Amino acid sequence: QAFEHAELWVKELNSKGSSELVRAADETGLVPVLAHGEFKWYRLTDQECLSREGDVMGHCVASYGMMLKKATQLYTVLEMDRIIHTLH
């Protein structure tokens, strides 16, 4: 059953249009860190960023809000303005 759910989740992610995988233009809380060619790194600094990242990427980073108050740093990596990785 876990494999079935995982397969459905992957199909759902793959069916999303590219506009669903990009950062919102007016999104606050993103701190530019590095740009190299087609890749851009941003630090995620508020709950709004974490929530959007979790929604777009389909993972639990939205629950890490309390970690932002500590020394933890969270990053998102974009390739050609599409989110491709979340780093902790």
Image (tube, grey):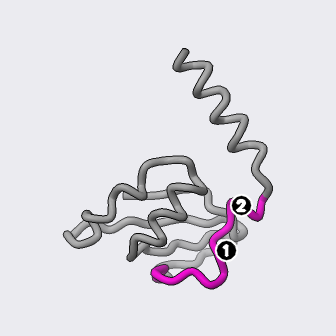
Mark 2–mark 1 Cα distance, whole angstroms, equals 22 Å
Kindly identify the residue that appears in the image at 76 percent across and 64 percent down.
Answer: 19
Name the element at disc 2: helix
Q: Which quadrant: the N terminus?
A: top right
Residue ID for mark 1? 37
State the residue in front, 55 or 80: 55
Measured along the vertical axis of the image, is residue 80 above or below residue 33? Answer: above
Kindly identify the residue that appears in the image at 60 percent across and 56 percent down.
Answer: 56
Q: Is residue 55 left or right of residue 29?
A: right
Q: Residues within 10 Å of mark 1 (few under 14, many from 20)?
A: few
Q: Is residue 72 left or right of residue 49?
A: left
Q: Is residue 6 left or right of residue 18?
A: left
Name the element at disc 1: loop
Q: Which range is magenta?
A: 18-31
Look at discs 2 and 1 and give the one toward the viewer: 2
The answer to if 29 sits in the magenta stretch is yes
Please tell me which of labels 2 and 1 falls first in the chain. Answer: 2
Quadrant housing residue 12: top right
Kindly identify the residue that appears in the image at 58 percent across and 78 percent down.
Answer: 35
The answer to if 82 sits in the magenta stretch is no
Quadrant housing residue 8: top right
State the residue in front, 46 or 79: 46
Q: Which mark is residue 20?
A: 2
The amino acid type found where label 2 is placed reads Glu
The amino acid type found where label 1 is placed reads Gly
